Image: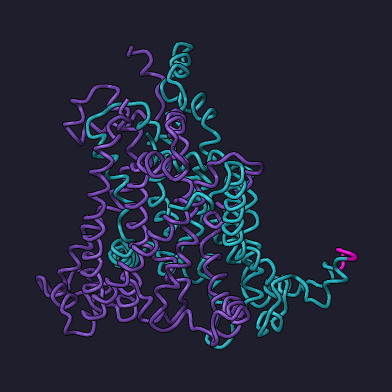
């Protein structure tokens, strides 16, 4: 790096971070440059991700309720009282929160299973050579590309008990004899799984499809010489070779479903039934209906801890696989 | 296993398998596309047609079918265009669209600017803490939004009251929040696109007298344009679809489409026809853009997760 080139550096490179962070001076010129490029992104993440999270944890041990919304810092310190309250199954709130966690698990495991089956089927079909394969792939991706607020409202309309097309179709096909309540009552969670899976299966499909494409052709050639049929090829080559991608799919789908707010919020409308209140929706309604931010924050931290425990698995997997390889 | 006499010949099995997979593919396509078809169809229907006990799943009834087959242009006269006209007066749809466009496009511009710098740093440089920063970027995608929303709401209220800077129900407040949420994904996606551009390109530019930053802006960014467009579309869609933060921080005059559209269903009446008309208007450009630019979008999304 010559001194002359530093004169024409643009303003991005002129920020003197070293003045504030002594450690920074010990980095090489290239490393400093990399950090300068990353600086805006890191600052924003610090402001909106990390500070609020720390703050959220702080609030979860304060008695912030409707009286302290604008003076949260004057709220009394209550130790772990908020956690005890929301996790105590004898209180109404605690009981409902546990129930919402259970519904969250049904939601994420159910979605994972359904999207995986649909996604794998679609990916396998697309992996064959046929006319119109590209068009089919494009069309199958549309549920995921169309804005989810819109598609969720379409499903909400289709699932109406009186006027919805789904009940009307099922009735005329003789599958059911009475119109079903899809959006209220105890089975709402399954409707949620169905609809959310529809919005997410294209993502699973495209990830598995990319995985399928990277399986070496020679494996299949060798297998067919050995007389392996379609099923054997799937069982002993395709499925095991997809394992790394599948692991990512499993963790991402479970995690993202667990923290998904849009699907239950839009699909279930203004008065969501208890059965459809997955944790994040329950916390939202609880916190904003009576401004119990301290307790709401405590529940959020619990949800976060569960999600993080799963994310750990995901990272462990990524690091073991190929994350460090990306270093260049 | 199946007894031998029931086994099909090789070519028979092949045909059966092909038929079967075509059938399954057909079912999947039907499943994937029916709701979108239903949205468009419902947007051209009157309230009475939508709430009918046995709605026709085709744009015409059985009685009208003969006419339509004889002359397909009859179909156009069977559609009702009412909803596309009444929705603007009945609901402030136009404002919702404008708000969403402003919020999502400004977010996209900011997120791309910040994301290009970060993604480039990730793609080209080795620096201490790279794995940590990378992990933190991915980690932001695992945080339940509600954990951030509650403290942020208190923070915004506090800033508004003590510093007199309005943040709730303003464009800049929600845009700042969205930009931050989309930057990690933008960095991650763009890093993949930059990876696919050979290093030699910048080295050549450097030899020709470009500074590092000039090499990035004048040489690398234009080459990464398809990837940047794909990332931009992803960011735009994320901002367009977001409801958790918008439902608390963007009400009143800045209500975006994602929140406003829900008001078409009131306690007593649901204006499905108008809702679907507005939805069709919102969805059509997005689907068309996707169909045109899908290749880099699909590549960019699978890049991070399926790298072998």
Q: Which residue is drawn at 88% across and 71% down?
A: B67
Where is residue A42? Give x, y as percent. Answer: 31, 42
Q: Is residue B18 left or right of residue B65?
A: left
**Is residue B71 one of those drawn in magenta?**
yes
Q: In this view, does B306 lie to the left or right of A66?
A: right
Quadrant of the rendered structure where residue B93 is? bottom right
- The correct choice, above or below, for A105 with respect to A81 in the image is above
Q: In which quarter of the image is the C terminus of chain B?
A: top left
Quadrant of the rendered structure where residue B33 is? bottom right
- The correct choice, above or below, for B198 with respect to A84 in the image is above
Q: What stretch is highlighted in magenta?
A: B70-74
Where is residue B143? Give x, y as percent. Answer: 30, 56
The colour of chain A is: purple
- The correct choice, above or below, for A138 with respect to B308 in the image is below
Q: In this view, does B90 lie to the left or right of A26?
A: right
Q: Camera-side residue: B233 or A313?
A: A313
Q: Is residue B80 left or right of residue A91?
A: right
In the picture, one chain is cyan; tell me its letter.
Answer: B
């Amino acid at each position: 790096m010559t001194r002359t080139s530093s004169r024409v550096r643009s303003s991005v490179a002129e920020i003197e971070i070293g003045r504030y962070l002594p450690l920074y001076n010990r980095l090489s010129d290239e490393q400093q440059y990399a950090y300068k490029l990353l600086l805006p992104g890191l600052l924003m993440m610090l402001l909106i991700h990390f500070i609020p999270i720390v703050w959220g944890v702080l609030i979860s041990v304060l008695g912030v309720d409707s009286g302290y919304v604008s003076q949260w810092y004057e709220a009394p310190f209550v130790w772990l009282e908020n956690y005890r309250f929301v996790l105590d199954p004898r209180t109404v709130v605690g009981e409902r929160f546990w129930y919402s966690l259970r519904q969250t698990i049904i939601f994420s495991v159910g979605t994972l299973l359904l999207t995986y089956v649909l996604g794998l089927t679609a990916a396998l079909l697309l992996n064959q050579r046929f006319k119109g394969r590209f068009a089919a792939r494009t069309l199958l991706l549309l549920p995921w590309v169309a804005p989810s607020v819109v598609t969720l409202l379409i499903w909400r309309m289709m699932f109406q008990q009186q006027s919805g097309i789904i009940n009307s179709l099922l009735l005329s096909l003789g599958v059911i004899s009475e119109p079903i309540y899809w959006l209220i009552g105890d089975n709402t969670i399954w409707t949620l799984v169905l609809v959310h899976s529809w919005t997410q299966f294209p993502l699973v499909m495209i990830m598995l499809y990319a995985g399928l494409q990277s399986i070496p052709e020679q494996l299949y050639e060798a297998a067919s010489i050995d007389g392996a049929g379609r099923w054997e090829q799937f069982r002993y080559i395709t499925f095991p070779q997809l394992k790394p991608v599948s692991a990512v799919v499993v963790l991402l789908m479970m995690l993202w479903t667990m923290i998904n707010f849009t699907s239950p919020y839009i699909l279930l409308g203004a008065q969501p039934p208890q059965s459809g209140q997955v944790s994040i929706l329950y916390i939202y309604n609880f916190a904003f209906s009576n401004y119990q931010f301290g307790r709401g924050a405590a529940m959020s931290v619990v949800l976060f801890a569960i999600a993080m425990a799963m994310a750990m698995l995901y990272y462990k997997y990524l690091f073991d696989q190929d994350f460090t390889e990306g270093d260049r | 296993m199946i007894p031998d006499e029931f086994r099909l010949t090789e070519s028979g099995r092949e045909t059966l398998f092909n038929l079967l997979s075509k059938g399954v593919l057909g079912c999947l396509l039907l499943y994937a596309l029916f709701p979108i078809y239903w949205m468009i169809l419902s947007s051209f229907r009157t309230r009475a047609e939508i709430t009918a006990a046995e709605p026709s799943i085709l744009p015409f009834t059985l009685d009208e079918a003969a006419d339509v087959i004889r002359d397909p242009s009859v179909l156009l006269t069977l559609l009702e265009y009412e909803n596309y006209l009444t929705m603007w007066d009945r609901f402030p749809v136009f404002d919702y669209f404008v708000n969403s466009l402003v919020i999502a496009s400004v977010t996209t511009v900011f997120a791309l600017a910040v994301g290009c710098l970060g993604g480039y740093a990730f793609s080209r440089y080795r620096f201490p803490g790279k794995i940590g920063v990378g992990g933190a970027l991915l980690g932001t995608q695992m945080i339940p939004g509600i954990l951030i929303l509650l403290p942020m709401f208190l923070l915004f209220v506090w800033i508004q009251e003590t510093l007199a800077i309005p943040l709730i129900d303003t464009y800049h407040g929600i845009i700042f929040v969205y930009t931050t949420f989309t930057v990690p994904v933008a960095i991650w996606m763009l890093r993949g696109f930059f990876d696919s551009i050979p290093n030699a390109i910048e080295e050549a530019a450097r030899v020709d007298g470009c500074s590092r930053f000039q090499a990035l802006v004048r040489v690398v960014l234009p080459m990464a344009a398809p990837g940047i467009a794909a990332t931009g579309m992803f960011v735009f869609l994320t901002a367009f679809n977001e409801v958790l933060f918008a439902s608390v921080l963007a009400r009143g005059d800045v209500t975006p489409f994602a929140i406003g559209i829900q008001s078409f269903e009131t306690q007593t009446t649901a204006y499905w026809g108008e809702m679907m008309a507005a939805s069709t208007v919102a969805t059509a450009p997005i689907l068309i853009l996707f169909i045109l630019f899908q290749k880099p979008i699909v590549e960019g999304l699978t890049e991070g997760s399926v790298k072998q």
